[in-house]
Amino acid sequence: MSSSGLSFLFLLSLAIFSIARGQERAPHGLVYESPLAFSPAAYDFFHPNAQKPQTRDSCTASKCSPLPLAAQVDGTQIYQNKASATQKGGKQIGAGGVAGIITVFAFVVLLTMGIYYVKVTRQANMNRASSSVQSHA
């Protein structure tokens, strides 16, 4: 194998490992974003023409009974449990896993190239040996 091929593979593996380290240091993407709710003042700032509700509590106008506080708390806890379960459920491969897969792939490619080189070299040596034996006879 030529030295330029080895230096290329070394530089490629160095670049892959540096990218993997960068992912551990500063993760980015939608997976790592945490949604934030706008405050009412911020919503009013971005939606100046939105209609304002006449009353704060819709039950005061219709004289209905509001939900008990326990029902609201239970609903919030159920929603939070479902949200956390969906976030934890997805298995993600880390930067080390990606680097491991790429390293194994590079090893397999190098091993295949080595086996091919040995096979071609032996075949050429056998052809030279058989041609020299026939020319002397």
Image (cartoon, rainbow, N blue to C red):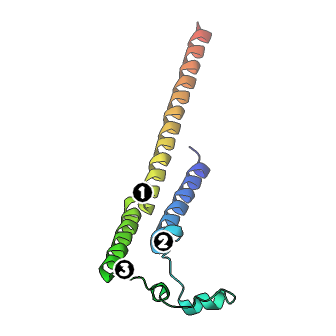
**Callout 2 environment at 10 Å: few (<14), some (14 to 19), or many (20+)?**
few
Q: Which residue was labeled with disc 3?
A: 67
Q: Earlier in the sequence, mark 2 or mark 3?
A: 2
Disc 1 marks which residue?
A: 97
Are the two marked residues, 2 and 3, in contact with CB atoms closer than 8 angstroms? no
Mark 1 and mark 3 lie on one chain; the one further toward the N terminus is 3
Q: What numbered label is drawn on residue 14? A: none
Of the 4 image quadrants, the one containing the C terminus is: top right
Which residue lies at the image location 49% right of the left edge and 62% below the top edge? 17
- Image depth: mark 1 or mark 3 in front: 3
Q: CA distance from mark 1 to mark 2?
A: 18 Å
Above or below 108: residue 43 = below
Image quadrant where one finds the N terminus: top right
Q: Judging from the image, what secondary structure is the residue with disc 1 in?
A: helix
- The residue type indicated by label 3 comes to Leu
Pick the residue in front: 127 or 1.
1
Question: Residue at label 2?
Answer: 32
Above or below, comparing residue 87 to residue 47 in the picture: above
